[in-house]
Image (tube, helix red, strand yellow):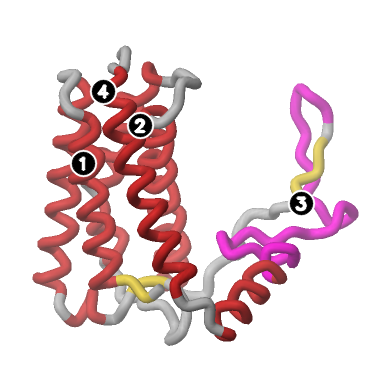
Amino acid sequence: MKLSRSTRAGVGLAGVGYVLVAGFVAFAVPTDAARQQETASTSQAHSHSHDHGHSHVDADQAEQLTGPFGPHGDRHPQAPVFETAADGLTERRRRSMSALSGHFRAVSATLLSDAGGEEMIQNHANALAALGGQIDTLFKTPSPAPEGEKGALPVIWEEQERFAQYTAAFATESAQFAQTVQAGGDLVNGLHDLRYYCVACHADFRQR
């Protein structure tokens, strides 16, 4: 797939606009609380415990793996056995959402650069459609995030019919985007429309 200059320009303008708006919101009111939060975030980034769920152990505690390229120690061990089904589902949901975000951002990065990768856009779009079509299964068991922590809000299970409308809309839109890529259609607006459903669902059902 060869992207036209107009396609790159369209995505580029959208991306610049989004960054500018986000920048104005972030820096409009530099409160003490915001500065304290930034300090805390920086400190957390340098700690051994990562927000994405991997614990970072010392080299002498690494799990030893063997294979054709010699022995290697994995300092990011696999997740422990979860105490409840809700805990396991929460971990699986977070990983799946991270995967969705990764595929989405990979497409965006391809459209916004001259680094190539157009031949992989269809693979990313297909993955978005496949994961998007099963997104509702990630919320079968009530598993809201603890109060004050990022994650799913209780309203998901309190208003299941309304939430189902959001997941169904995302499933439809992600499938449509995969078809748009295959047909060589308007990727700029396709990606914009898909992103809308992500933002809308997070705004109404995710604790930030």
Question: How busy is the neighbourhood of tag 4: few (under 14 within 10 Å), some, or many (20 plus)?
Answer: few
Q: Are marks 1 and 4 in contact (CB under 8 Å)?
A: no
Name of the residue lying farthest toward the top: 2
Q: Position of residue 100 (x, y in %)?
A: 37, 46
Q: Judge whether residue 126 can be spotted in this image.
A: no
Q: Residue at x 23, y 74 (%)?
A: 156
Disc 3 crowd, CA 10 A, few/some/many (<14, 14-19, 20+): some
Disc marking residue 124: 2
Residue in view at x 14 percent, y 64 percent:
164
Judged from the image, the secondary structure of the residue bearing numbered disc 3 is loop
Q: Amino acid at mark 3?
A: Arg
> Counting residues from the N terminus, which is met first, the one under dot 1 or under dot 3?
3
What residue sits 68% from the left and 69% below the top?
A: 44
Q: Secondary structure at mark 2?
A: helix
Query: Circle 2: is it few (<14), some (14-19), or many (20+) Cα within 10 Å?
Result: many
196 and 136: which is toward the camera = 196
Mark in the foreground, 1 or 4: 4
Q: If the image is split into quadrants, where does the C terminus sit?
A: bottom left
What residue did someone put label 3 on? Answer: 75
Give the mark toward the camera: 1 or 3.
1
What amino acid type is highlighted by mark number 1? Ser
The answer to whether residue 47 is left or right of residue 91 is: right
> Rounded to the nearest whole Å, what is the CA distance between mark 2 and mark 4?
22 Å
In this image, 206 relative to 163: left or right? right
Q: Which residue is mark 4?
A: 6
Q: Which numbered marker is on residue 174?
A: 1
Residue depicted at x 39% and y 22%: 120
Q: Which residues are magenta?
A: 44-70
Q: Nearer the viewer, mark 4 or mark 3?
A: 4
The spot of residue 179 in percent (x, y) is 16, 28
Pointer 4 or 3: first along the chain: 4
